[in-house]
Image (cartoon, rainbow, N blue to C red):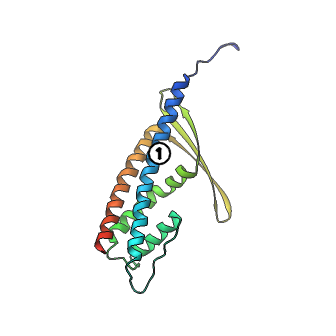
Amino acid sequence: MNALTTIDLPAVSCWDEVYTDVNAWRGTCMHHFTQVEMAVTQTLIALSAVKRDGETLRLRHLIGQQYEDLASAISPTGPFAKEGKSAFALFSSYRDHHEAFRALLCHGAIKVSVERNGQWLLVVRSLSIRSRQAVYDEQIIEQSAAQEKLAALKRDGQKLSTSLGNLRKSIE
């Protein structure tokens, strides 16, 4: 290749299609996160209406705080341990598998690249503070892995939302 050789780049419409696809995937993930967040908030409100052992459940604003409050309420030592046993197991698993991904997807800066085969690739970078120290994270997500993450998120979120709905019904 000499210095005057040009490289053919994909047409603009190709990039538009890629960004549309990436944003649709990210938006669908956000939808599934918000469905779980709604179920968690509804469950906290329902549990707070039922007095157990003179305890008052906290109803805090931030979703991370709500996750902590729900986990505490339905944990094996919580006031709703009996009713929340199956929901607690699903909730713990959901958090283990999806909570960090949620933070990364919601708060990370994303760059998109396209491989030769036409599949997109995301580079997601985030910066957070842990123990008063900056923590940088970078993950690369291939399109096929992104679709697998979305399928797991949907499946696990639906199971958890159903379980939390059953918990709410059991305390009515």
144 relative to 48, above or below: above
50 relative to 25, above or below: below
As helix, strand or loop, the secondary structure at mark 1 comes to helix
1 relative to 103, above or below: above
Q: Is residue 131 left or right of residue 62?
A: right
Percent from the top left, x then y, of residue 39?
39, 62
Residue under the image location 37 percent in, 77 percent down? 80
Please tell me how crowded label 1 is: few (under 14), some (14-19), or many (20+) other residues with Cα within 10 Å: some
Percent from the top left, x then y, of residue 45?
41, 71
**Image-quadrant location for residue 113:** top right
Q: Amino acid at mark 1?
A: Gly
Residue under the image location 41 percent in, 56 percent down? 35
Residue under the image location 42 percent in, 75 percent down? 73
Percent from the top left, x then y, of residue 117?
47, 27
Residue highlighted by disc 1: 27
Mark count: 1
170 relative to 12, above or below: below
Percent from the top left, x then y, of residue 169?
29, 70
Q: Residue furthest right?
A: 3
Quarter of the figure with the C terminus: bottom left
* Front in this rendered view, residue 100 or 54: 54
Residue under the image location 39 percent in, 77 percent down? 49
Is residue 75 something one can see in this rendering?
A: no
Is residue 111 something one can see in this rendering?
A: yes
Q: Is residue 17 left or right of residue 167?
A: right
Q: Is residue 140 left or right of residue 128?
A: left
Quarter of the figure with the N terminus: top right
* Front in this rendered view, residue 171 or 141: 171
